[in-house]
């Protein structure tokens, strides 16, 4: 397997500094695009502080809400109002207050099964993008936000699951999760996540140190295979980095 593409590592003091750095990068990506911008959000608990910051006066006033569209990299196949729904968290914390309704693009879970959901979301992404194939000169997303699970998964691409090997589809259903919550998932694939100007990993807390060490060792894990065609940035706090990385 080819060795992972080079990435940038940024180490910050703590989760608050991490949220701040992520918010600044997100704004910079939106600013760099004078037209319609697209952001891929992440689920899990890591982006919560970032979302809270985006809801603050300081940030919400700087976001040009009328030209930003919000997508999600993966979803738990539970109703939109279920507390485990990834988009619900983003909606409750910031999107619901500021984003025009038709700029919020959730993965639909009110359909028969994860495969149908994946088909629909893929159609929605293709229609937004305006083509059925990715053009490397024109990434789908300005920024894709991702996290890393304890097993090295990212989005809902779990180690050794078929979804990680998908090269054609943009979105796929995942019948069974590898970690909690054990509900079916729907996830963007590696090529869809890759179609971005920047992929931004947020990794914080001592409990992430073990998996970070494995990533740094170059293990063949989904989080080491998810790479942007543009820039890939690992934003890490000191507790997660431990002694493995140095930084500000
Ligand atoms: C999900 C996520 C998942 C998440 C990682 C990290 O639906 O759970 O999209 O990929 O980003 O598991 O989760 P935490 O941020 O909760 O550690």
Image (tube, helix red, strand yellow):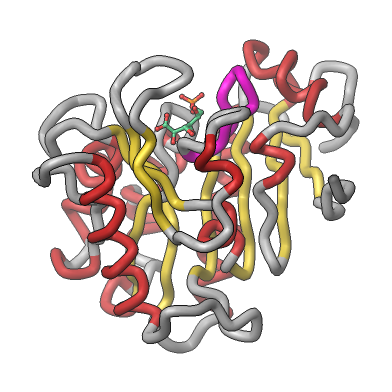
Read off the magenta span. Answer: 148-155
Question: Is residue 149 part of the magenta span, yes or no?
Answer: yes
Q: Is residue 220 left or right of residue 175?
A: right
**Which corner quadrant of the image does residue 103 belong to?**
bottom left
Q: Is residue 17 left or right of residue 80?
A: right
Q: Is residue 82 left or right of residue 51?
A: left
Residue at image coords 23%, 50%: 117
**Which corner quadrant of the image does residue 215 belong to?**
top right
Q: Quadrant of the C terminus?
A: top right
Q: Is residue 145 left or right of residue 99?
A: right
Q: Quadrant of the N terminus?
A: top right
Q: Does residue 111 lie above or below 192 as drawn?
A: above
The residue closer to the viewer here, 63 or 212, is 212
Q: Position of residue 131 (x, y in %)?
A: 41, 84
Q: Does residue 176 lie above or below 247 as drawn?
A: above
Question: Is residue 64 part of the magenta span, yes or no?
Answer: no
Residue at image coords 89%, 23%: 244
The residue closer to the viewer here, 76 or 55, is 76
Residue 194: tell me if it is visible.
yes
Q: Position of residue 184 (x, y in %)?
A: 30, 29
Overall secondary structure of the magenta section: loop
Q: Position of residue 165 (x, y in %)?
A: 60, 46
The residue closer to the viewer here, 125 or 93, is 125
Residue at image coords 17%, 68%: 100
């Amino acid at each position: 397997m080819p060795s992972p593409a080079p990435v940038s590592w940024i180490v910050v003091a703590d989760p608050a500094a991490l949220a701040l750095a992520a918010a600044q990068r997100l704004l910079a990506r939106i600013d760099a695009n004078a037209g319609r911008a697209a952001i891929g959000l992440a689920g899990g608990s890591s982006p919560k502080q970032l979302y809270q910051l985006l809801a603050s006066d300081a940030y919400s006033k700087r976001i040009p809400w009328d030209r930003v569209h919000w997508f999600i990299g993966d979803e738990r196949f539970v109703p939109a109002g279920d507390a485990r729904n990834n988009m619900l968290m983003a909606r409750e914390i910031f999107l619901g207050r500021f984003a025009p309704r038709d700029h919020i693009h959730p993965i639909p879970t009110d359909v028969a099964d994860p495969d149908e959901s994946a088909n629909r979301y893929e159609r929605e992404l293709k229609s937004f993008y305006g083509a059925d194939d990715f053009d490397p000169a024109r990434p789908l997303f300005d920024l894709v936000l991702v996290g890393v699970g304890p097993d090295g998964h990212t989005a809902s691409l779990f180690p050794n699951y078929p979804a990680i090997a998908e090269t054609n589809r943009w979105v796929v259903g995942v019948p069974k999760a590898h970690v909690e919550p054990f509900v079916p998932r729907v996830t963007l694939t590696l090529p869809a996540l890759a179609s971005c100007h920047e992929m931004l990993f947020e990794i914080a807390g001592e409990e992430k140190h073990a998996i970070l060490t494995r990533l740094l060792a170059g293990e063949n894990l989904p989080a080491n295979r998810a790479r942007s065609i543009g820039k890939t940035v690992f934003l890490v706090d000191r507790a997660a980095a431990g002694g493995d990385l140095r930084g500000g």
